[in-house]
Image (cartoon, grey):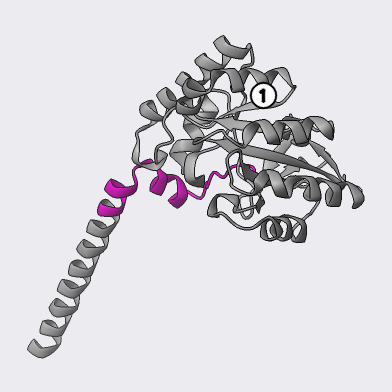
Amino acid sequence: MRVFYGLVISKRIKTIFLLIIFLLAVAGAYRFFGTDVSATAGGKRLVPIYYVDTPEKKIAISFDASWGAEHTPKILSILREHNIKTTFFLTGLWIDKYPDLVKKIADEGHELGNHTATHPHLNSLDKAAIKNELRQVHTILKELTGQEPKLFRPPFGEYSNKVIEAATELNYLTIQWSIDSLDWKDLTQEQIFTRVTSQLHPGAIVLFHNNGTHTAAALPDIIKYVHDAGYEIVKISDLIYQDNYYIDSSDGAQKQDPPN
């Protein structure tokens, strides 16, 4: 009887010990990840729009601008030649350094998106600091071009529930991409062409950088391939659904709500 009682006590102590370890682990995770862990644990994982679920043969081309500008005039010339309007996500640092180019991009009919003021790792900031990053760019773009951006792309493609919530509270849609050209890695013209064209699909959002070494060189052949395949190239705002939609958390597809 004493042996049995001792075993029961031992099991209870072990159970309590394991429970304490579990609770400490959860508390530590919460402290490290903040509100994002609780949101995910609660079953609601927020994701940006990676692509649009559509039967229409349309894609959007986008350019992130956070460093350099020597290739930007050539890119604009190519887009003008093919009568294509795209979306440029600009950082505040880039806007401050190249205000005339920002005006030119806007004047030529391209859409301006918010890429934060200083290109930080947003997951490391609190919500107030994230909003400050977005507000700075919003204000300067409105003053400089008259455009009020509605689309936001997080630097480094990093996001969390906290980041998306902050953007949403400022009336921004958070945008990622489904095709990454990897032009920032100094891929060759041929490699960029292959990466983009081999993944082509309806509703795709393609990521380029305005100052990729071989982006401008690859662009004409990519445009020709896309057009020959029967696709139209549009701005992101002309690709995405504006209402009656949801974002599939499994792959970031923006989908229309099912009919009632």
User: Where does the image place residue 159, in percent across and percent down from the top left?
Assistant: 48, 43
The residue under the point 30% across, 53% down is 29
- For residue 42, above or below residue 144: below
Name the foreground residue: 127 vs 25.
127
User: Where does the image place residue 96, in percent across and percent down from the top left?
Assistant: 47, 21
Query: Looking at the figure, which quarter contains the N terminus?
Result: bottom left
Residue 84: which quarter of the image? top right
Residue type at numbered disc 1: Ile
Seen in the image, is 221 located left or right of residue 179? right
Residue 31 in the magenta stretch? The answer is: yes
Seen in the image, is 66 located left or right of residue 188? left
- For residue 114, above or below residue 103: below
- For residue 73, above or below residue 96: below
Residue that mark 1 sits on: 105
Residue 50 seen in this snapshot: no
User: Where does the image place residue 184, in percent across and percent down from the top left?
Assistant: 55, 49
Name the foreground residue: 244 vs 240.
240
The region drawn magenta spans 28-50
Query: Looking at the figure, which quarter contains the C terminus?
Result: top right
The residue under the point 79% across, 45% down is 220
The residue under the point 63% across, 44% down is 208
Name the foreground residue: 99 vs 162.
99
Residue 205: which quarter of the image? top right
User: Where does the image place residue 193, in percent across and percent down from the top left?
Assistant: 73, 56
Q: Which residue ends up furthest to the left in the rendered image?
A: 2
Seen in the image, is 245 located left or right of residue 207? right
Residue 126 in the magenta stretch? The answer is: no
Name the foreground residue: 84 vs 148.
84
Label 1 crowd bin: few (<14), some (14–19), many (20+), radius 10 Å: many
The residue under the point 15% across, 84% down is 7
Seen in the image, is 224 located left or right of residue 113? right
Residue 233 seen in this snapshot: yes
